[in-house]
Amino acid sequence: MREYLLTLCITAAVTYLLTGPVRKFAIVAGAMPEIRARDVHREPTPRLGGIAMFFGLCAGLLVADHLTNLNEVFEKSNEPRALLSGAALIWLIGVLDDKFEIDALIKLGGQMIAAGVMVMQGLTILWLPVPGAGTVALTQWQGTLLTVALVVITINAVNFVDGLDGLASGMVCIAAAAFFMYAYRIWYSYGIEAAAPATLFAAILMGMCLGFLPHNMHPARIFMGDSGSMLIGLVLAAGAISITGQVDPDSLFGGSQRQTVHHMVPVYIPLLLPLTIIAIPAADLVLAIVRRTWRGQSPFAADRGHLHHRLLEIGHSHSRAVLIMYFWSALIAFGALAYSVNSASMWIVLGVVFLSAIGLLLLLLPRFTPRAPRWAEHFVPPRYRRRRAVAETASTPAHPAAVEEEQCPPVVAGVPGVNGATALGTRPRFLDRRKAGSPR
C-alpha cells in the first residue's frame, strides 16, 4: 500500500507542478478557442491540460517500475507498456484536436487504433462471466472487438461529461478511488496477481486527476481538453479491461460455493464494477445519441442537452451542479463496491436508497443557498458566509457623511498598488474625490 500511495503522490505532484507551465504554453501556442454556443464559461480559457496529465502518467509508471514490489508488475505483465503505448497515441490525437479542431470521425478512428495497439500488446478481454452460463472464453476476434468497444465507449463517455469546471476530473477521480479499493482487495485479500496492474492503473489515475483538479475548479484557469479527457478515459478503460477480462472468476469463487451461487446475479456484481463506475457518463452518452438522432442530427454534433447543462437550466449554480454530479457518481461507485463486499446485507441497500432520496431532494432545491456556521466562515468561499457586516450597517442608522468617511477612507492619487480591482468605494464617489482633491 505504501508503494501505491507513493506512486499516487508522485503522479499528482508532477501533474500539479506542470499544469502552470502548460497553461502558459497553451496561451502562447494559441490553444484558446473562442467561446462556443454550448460552452458555459464566459472568457476564453486555454486548453492542453492533458499535456501535464500525460507526463504525470509517465512519472507514475517510471516511479512504479523502480519500486521493489511494484516492479513485479512490469516483469510479469506487459499491460503497463500496453497502456503507455495507447495513452501516447490517444494523447497525441487529443493535442492535435485541442489546437486544430480535427474531425470527429478522425478522432473516432484514432481511438480505435489506440485500443488496437493495447490489444496487440496483451491488454484484452479473455473471458466474461455470464449469468446462467458461467465463465465464457472469448475467441481472439471477440475479445478484440469487445475491448475496442469498451475503450471507445469509456473515452467518449468521459469526454461528454467534460462540460463544467472540474466535472470530468472529479468524477473520474471518484470512480478511480472506488476501483482502486476493489482491485486492491482482490489483489491483497485473494492473492490474485492478475489484479495488480489494474490496481496500479487506478492509483495513477487518481494522481492525475488530483494533481489537475486544483487548476480546473470553478473558475477554471485551464481546461484538460480532449488531450486530457480522452487520456483519463483510456486509463479508466484499461483498468476495467485488465481486471474484468484478465482475472478468472473461478479464482474468486471456487468449489461448491461457486456452484451454489452459480445462477445468482450478485456473484457477477463485483466483476461488473468497472462498468458501473462510468454509469453517469455512459447514461449521458446514450441520452445524447438518442436525442441527436431523434432530431436528425449527427451523434457527434455538439449541443447543450447534457446532464450538467440540464442542472444549470433548472437553477443550480455551477459549483452545485458539479457537486451533485460528484454525489451521484460516488453513490453508484461506492454502492457497487459495498455490495460487492457483502451482497447479503440489507443495510447496504437501505443506505443506498436513503442517499438516493437525499440526492433527489438536492435536485429539487436549486434555489437553496447553504450558509456555513460562524466558526467555519473562514474556511468556505465568501458566498457561503453570513453577511453580518451588511446587516449591522443596515440596522444602525448613521449620518451619510460619517458612514462615507468611516467605510471609505480617502484614496490618494499615485499610491502604488491601487487600481480598479483594489480601490474602495463606488465609482461616482471616487470621481467626486478626484475632482475635489486631485491635482489632475
Image (cartoon, rainbow, N blue to C red):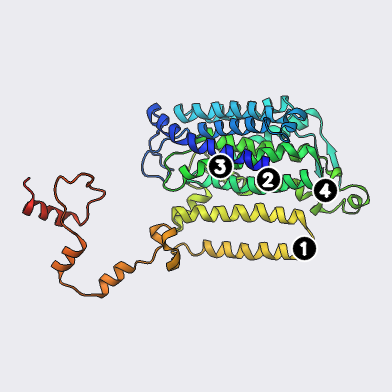
Residue 352, percent from left and from top: 67, 61
Alpha-carbon distance for marks 1 and 2? 22 Å
Identify which residue is drawn at 86% across, 45% down. Answer: 133
Q: Is there CB contact under 8 Å for labels 2 and 4? A: no
Q: Is there CB contact under 8 Å for labels 3 and 2? A: no
Q: Nearer the viewer, residue 424 or 295?
A: 424
Q: Which residue is disc 2 drawn over?
A: 180
Identify which residue is drawn at 53% across, 50% down. Answer: 307
> Tag 3's secondary structure?
helix
Label 2 or label 4, whichever lies nearer to me, is 2
Instruction: Indicate the amino acid at tag 4.
Output: Pro
Q: Is there CB contact under 8 Å for labels 1 and 4? A: no
Task: Give the mark nearest the N terminus, 1 or 4.
Answer: 4
Label 1 or label 2, whichever lies nearer to me, is 2
Q: Residues within 10 Å of mark 2 (few under 14, many from 20)?
A: many
Q: Which residue is disc 4 drawn over?
A: 131
Q: Which residue is disc 3 drawn over?
A: 209
> Tag 1's secondary structure?
loop
> Tag 2's secondary structure?
helix
